[in-house]
Image: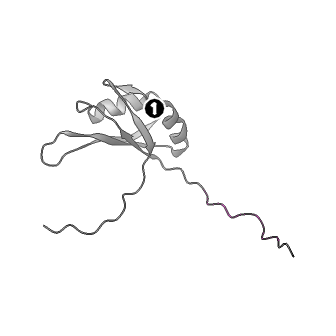
């Protein structure tokens, strides 16, 4: 039996995004509230609470865009579980939405 050295494993380079997903928001939390909560921990480019198109009511999640992606990991660690408006936040790196089949109406 002969062993063959195939060399070091190729590792995917981890890219850190500067956009964070924030879940578990209270219905009453506004984009300004979200911005103020995160500004205590990092520099914010944008904060947006996602609302329902028909009712205008919060859907309970939003996105925060940081000016510097190097702050993302520390911000996630500090803000995940943070209490805002009586709710514990769930904070993760935002991921691209999977492509789905076009809707037929």
Q: Measuring 49% from the left and 37% from the top, which residue is drawn there?
A: 76
Residue labelled with disc 1: 79
Vertical placement of residue 43 versus 85, above or below: below
Residue at image point 29% right, 36% down: 31
Range drawn in magenta: 5-13
| Residue furthest right in the image | 1
Q: In this rendering, would 67 be left or right of 70?
A: left
Percent x, y of residue 75: 50, 35
Whether residue 9 is in magenta: the answer is: yes
User: Which quarter of the figure has residue 15?
Assistant: bottom right
- Quarter of the image where the C terminus is located: bottom left
Asked if residue 54 shows in the view, the reply is: yes
Q: Position of residue 86 (x, y in %)?
A: 31, 23
Q: How many marks?
A: 1
**Would you say 10 lies left or right of 77 here?**
right
Q: Nearer the viewer, residue 65 or 76?
A: 76
Q: Is residue 48 visible?
A: no
In which quadrant of the rendered view does residue 73 lie? top right
Relative to 84, is 63 above or below?
below
| 51 on left or right of 12 | left
Q: Please name the predominant secondary structure of the magenta segment in the image.
A: loop
Which residue is drawn at the image coordinates 49% and 50% (left, top)? Answer: 17
Q: Mark 1 packing: few (<14 Cα in 10 Å), some, or many (20+)?
A: some
State the image coordinates of residue 41 (x, y, percent, origin top left). 48, 30
Image quadrant of residue 49? top left
Residue 19 rendering spot, x and y as whole percentages: 43, 47
Q: Quadrant of the N terminus?
A: bottom right
């Amino acid at each position: 039996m002969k062993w063959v050295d195939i060399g070091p494993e190729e590792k995917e380079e981890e890219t850190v995004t500067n956009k964070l997903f924030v879940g578990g928001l209270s219905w009453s939390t506004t984009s300004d509230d979200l911005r103020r909560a995160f500004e205590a921990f990092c520099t914010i480019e944008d904060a947006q609470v996602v609302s329902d198109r028909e009712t205008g009511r919060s859907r309970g999640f939003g996105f925060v865009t940081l000016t510097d992606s190097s702050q993302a990991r520390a911000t996630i660690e500090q803000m995940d579980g943070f209490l805002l408006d009586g709710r514990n936040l769930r904070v993760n790196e935002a991921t691209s939405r999977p492509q789905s089949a076009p809707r037929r109406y």
